[in-house]
């Protein structure tokens, strides 16, 4: 697998890949939801165009991950499990920043997600706050 990657805007044809990628994620990585969405929920979410920028990361014409930028300049990234830790995330982050220059980027990640904490620290993100919640879920 080459570190030469490209970013393509998410399209309708990417729904299945995005759903499969979502299925690879461990529950500790979820901030916005506590369970895997149904297919119907997933399709509705993707079609709602929830992010300012949302890309499929490709290498050698293979889809290998996704990277996004929210309307609040929060970065989200996920690379297929079998090819993580190879510099692809850093390359994708640099492409996203080049494509969408801003003064500030945020990464809202669970402190339980040690791999993401390490990734964003390595890429010069600094911890600025801890966020707490209370829910009625038991």
Image (cartoon, grey):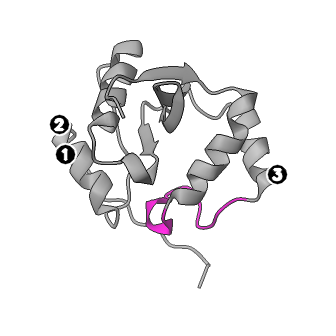
Disc 1 marks which residue?
Answer: 121
Whole-percent x, y for residue 27 in the image: 50, 67
Whole-percent x, y for residue 88 in the image: 33, 35
**Is residue 115 one of those drawn in magenta?**
no
**Image depth: mark 2 or mark 3 in front:** 3
Residue 26 - label: none
- Relative placement, left or right, of 39 versus 17 is right
Mark 2 or mark 3: whose residue is earlier in sequence: 3
Q: Residue furthest right?
A: 40
Disc 2 marks which residue?
Answer: 124
Q: Residue furthest bottom?
A: 138
Q: Helix, strand, or loop for circle 3?
A: helix
Mark 1 vs 2: CB contact within 8 A: yes
Q: Helix, strand, or loop for circle 1?
A: helix
**Against 31, is 137 above or below?**
below
Whole-percent x, y for residue 122 in the image: 17, 42
Disc 3 marks which residue?
Answer: 40
- Relative placement, left or right, of 94 versus 7 is left
Using the image as rendered, state which of residue 67 and residue 104 is in the foreground: 67
Number of marks drawn: 3
Q: Residues within 10 Å of mark 1 (few under 14, many from 20)?
A: few
Q: Helix, strand, or loop for circle 2?
A: loop
């Amino acid at each position: 697998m080459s570190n030469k990657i490209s970013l393509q805007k998410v399209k309708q044809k990417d729904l299945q890949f995005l759903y499969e990628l979502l299925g690879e994620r461990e529950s500790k990585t979820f901030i916005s939801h506590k369970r895997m969405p149904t297919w119907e929920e997933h399709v509705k979410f993707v079609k709602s165009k929830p992010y300012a920028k949302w890309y499929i990361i490709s290498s050698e014409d293979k889809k290998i991950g996704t990277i996004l930028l929210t309307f609040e300049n929060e970065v989200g990234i996920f690379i297929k499990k079998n090819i993580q830790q190879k510099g692809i995330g850093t390359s994708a982050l640099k492409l996203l920043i080049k494509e969408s220059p801003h003064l500030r980027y945020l990464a809202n990640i669970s402190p339980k997600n040690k791999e993401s904490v390490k990734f964003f620290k390595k890429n010069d993100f600094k911890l600025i706050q801890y966020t707490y919640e209370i829910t009625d879920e038991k």
